[in-house]
Image (spheres, rainbow, N blue to C red):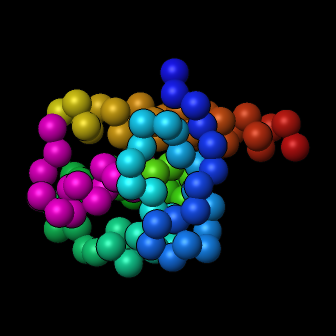
Amino acid sequence: MAAVFKQKCWKCRKNFVLVSSNQKYVICYDCQKDELNKKIKDPIMAELFNIPEEFYKESSFLRSIKSNYLRFGELSEKQIEAFKKVVKEMTEIAKKKKTNV
């Protein structure tokens, strides 16, 4: 398991982002927001990426997957499965937080 720490965004140099030791390029949600808000034409993929904005703010992995789809126009089955798995885990964590408050 990789160590997790905070590092400043490479683009704006203002915001801190949680990163692991194996991440090379660190970018915050605010700097990547314009890229992620592009229109998705495929209805299946549009539904897949229709998750709460908070998930994208918290997870650079989810932002990376969406960015790759917008850049290349497709994803592998493993990428889709990993995206769904992380969203499911984050949804469960969010539900637990709501019930504990």
- Relative image position of residue 98 (x, y in whole percent): 77, 43
* Residue placed furthest toward the right: 101
Asked which quadrant contains residue 13, the reply is bottom right
Quadrant housing the C terminus: top right
40 is higher (above) or lower (below) than 47: below
The residue drawn where x is 28% and y is 75% is 38
42 is higher (above) or lower (below) than 5: below
Asked which quadrant contains residue 7, the reply is bottom right
The residue drawn where x is 31% and y is 56% is 66
Marks counted in the figure total 0
* Residue placed furthest toward the left: 73
- Relative image position of residue 92 (x, y in whole percent): 61, 34
Looking at the rendering, the stretch of residues picked out in magenta corresponds to 61-76
User: Is residue 51 visible in the rendered structure shown here?
Assistant: no
The residue drawn where x is 38% and y is 78% is 34
Q: Is residue 36 left or right of residue 7?
A: left
- Give the main secondary structure, helix, strand or loop, of the magenta stretch: helix
- Relative image position of residue 45 (x, y in whole percent): 23, 54
The one nearer the camera, 22 or 69, is 22
The one nearer the camera, 73 or 30, is 30
* 67 in the magenta segment: yes
The residue drawn where x is 53% and y is 32% is 89
Q: Is residue 39 left or right of residue 28?
A: left
- Relative image position of residue 64 (x, y in whole percent): 34, 52
Q: Is residue 94 left or right of residue 38?
A: right
* Residue placed furthest toward the top: 1
User: Is residue 19 visible in the rendered structure shown here?
Assistant: yes
